[in-house]
Image: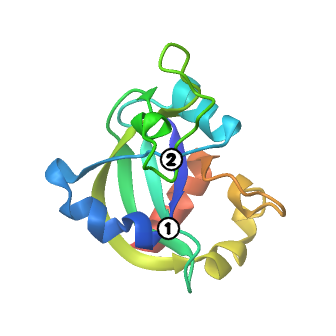
Amino acid sequence: MNHWLMKTEPDDCSIDDALAAAKRITPWTGVRNYQARNYMRDQMRVGDGVLFYHSSCPEPGIAGLAEVASAAYDDPSQFDRKSPYHDPKSKREAPRWQCVDVRALKKTRLMPIAELQAQPALKNMLTLRPGNRLSITPVSAAEWKLICNRLT
């Protein structure tokens, strides 16, 4: 099993929104970075753990736990001309972008980014590295365990 940190803007989809969704499942659409897409397409598996991270908000941080609920599939937003994630260069016969479904498991206390950065054991965590802007990053088993222990 793999573990992931997946960022979302709470104005777009918060942990509360994900928990309120039908069967608590939310399609993780709109990812427009090739590395993040490759993680979804090549490495994510159903059942993988997800740290649900609120970004671009007054206090960014981990807001809940979730799991990958589907294999990667073509992101429908790339073809939707009304979507802010529309990609006119992506063709139905050769789509560029993938997404997965995420099942929200529970809301946790907010673990702010400053708290993550203050943990020496997380100094190599990919999402905390200077300059990292990926919306999806892998989380090691040790990082996952430390974070989950501190969330409860």
Q: Position of residue 143 (x, y in %)?
A: 60, 55
Looking at the image, residue 3 lies above or below residue 13: above
Residue type highlighted by circle 1: Glu
Residue depicted at x 46% and y 34%: 79
**106 left or right, relative to 45:** left
Judge from the rendering whether residue 137 lies leftward or rightward of residue 14; answer left or right. right
Q: Amino acid at mark 2?
A: Gly
- Which residue corresponds to mark 1? 9
| Residue 102 location, quadrant | top left
Q: How is the image coloured?
A: rainbow
Would residue 55 be seen by someone viewing this image from the given angle? yes
Quadrant of the frame with the C terminus: bottom left
Q: Nearer the viewer, residue 33 or 46?
A: 33
Q: CA distance from mark 2 to mark 1?
A: 12 Å
The relative height of residue 5 versus residue 80 in the rendered view (above or below) is below
Secondary structure of the residue carrying tag 1 is loop
Please say whether residue 99 is visible from this viewpoint: no
